[in-house]
Image (cartoon, rainbow, N blue to C red):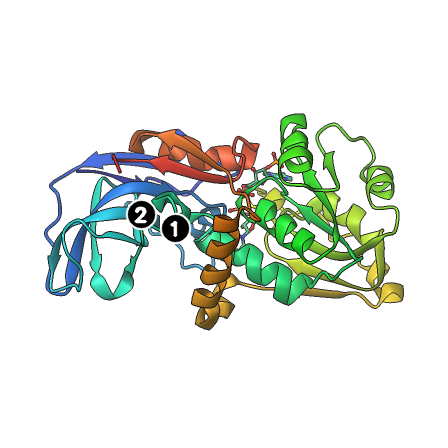
Amino acid sequence: NRKFLLAQRPEGKPDDDTFELVEGDVPEPGPGEVLVRTVYLSVDPYMRGRMRDAESYAEPWDVDEPLKGAVVGEVVESNGGGFEAGDVVTGDLEWADYATAPGSELTAVDPDLAPISTATSVLGMTGRTAFFGTREVAQPTAGDTFVVSGAAGAVGSVAGQIAKMAGARVVGFTGSDEKVEFLEDELGFDAAINYKEADDYVAALAEAAPDGVDAYFDNVGGPITDAVFQHLNLDARVAVCGQISQYNAEEMPTGPRKLGQLIGKRATVEGFLVWDFHARFEQANQQLAEWVQSGDLQYRETVIEGLANAPDAFVGLFEGENVGKQLVKVGEE
Ligand code: NDP
């Protein structure tokens, strides 16, 4: 059984020295525990925060201890954990071929509902983040202009489509021409801006959102957010979901620099955590699954093969290697 440990805390962008792959025995499930064979492992931007020794909403990982993340896998053995061998489950498990967890911390995945990988993507944490962040925090309504940064990622791509279903004009910021095409041609965004090519975000946004911005779903922060703040309309709502452009920063750049724009516009800026909506996860999943099945909601996954490549998959998030949800395929379905 292979598993990844946090070898050392990264400074700046994580690299090979951050991770250590070790081999050992397949663990035995203790009383109430379940042994799970990993099929898909999710890598997520928030994990960068867990590599830091600082207080945050997600507890820091200890050096020389296993990394953990959302896993979809197959139950191999259940020691009174409430599952049977062969069941498909999801939970927060080690980056490993096999791992154990209390059965009470695992959730059953219905393989007939959708491909099981979706339990970490559109029907998992990122889909629910998009669902609640859009509907409850950013709250776009018909005729509004909704802007999302990190638009082609797991959260952003779903958020934009949900805003579209609410009748908004949807504009995304993303990092390549291929992603612009994906958003405009496949997901039905009204416009997308390749921020790596645009010299002037304010001008690009003036063109893409000529009526100003009523709701902004922020996944990235930094200069993109500065530009959006300059286009907010009266009573605009900003949902602060993530700030990925800052996660590897060794020193925080000054900012946000355009807070003055919020004054005249009486704008509301609200941070949120998907976990805040925990009591309504099932409701969100029902709606998301319905949209996926009806074809109203498209989703994309980028899958890297092999547990050994999990660090590359993780670091790739900061380089925009992924379209939609970044996953690692660890074992056969
Ligand atoms: P994504 O699938 O969106 O992957 C990250 C994407 O961010 C990359 O593909 C890249 O796309 C973009 N990116 C990376 N660096 C930069 C940069 N410097 N400037 C602009 N864009 C950048 O990840 P998720 O969908 O999982 O997460 C999106 C955001 O939501 C993250 O900030 C995450 O922390 C946050 N989040 C918050 C939750 C909450 O409860 N509040 C829950 C889940 C996620 P590109 O090619 O466009 O650069």
- Which residue: 52% across, 42% down? 299
Left or right of 163? Residue 297 is: left
Q: Position of residue 4 (x, y in %)?
A: 29, 39
The quadrant the N terminus occupies is top left
Q: Secondary structure at mark 1?
A: helix
Q: Secondary structure at mark 2?
A: strand
Q: Residue furthest bottom?
A: 279
Left or right of 325? Residue 160 is: right
**Mark 2 closeness class: few <14, some 14–19, many ≥20 residues within 10 Å:** many
Residue 224: name its quadrant. top right
- Is there a contact, CB below 8 Å, between mark 2 and mark 1? yes
Q: Position of residue 174 (x, y in %)?
A: 66, 37
- Which residue: 47% across, 46% down? 48
Instruction: Tell which of 64 and 3 is nearer to you.
Output: 3
Residue matched to label 1: 119
Q: Which mark is residue 96?
A: none
First of labels 2, 1 by sequence position: 2
Q: Quadrant of ligand 1?
A: top right
Residue matched to label 2: 72
Amino acid at circle 2: Val
Marks 2/1: CA distance?
7 Å
Mark 1 CB near ligand 1 (8 Å cut): no
**Quick check: 64 above or below 232?**
above
- Which residue: 14% across, 65% down? 32
The quadrant the C terminus occupies is top left
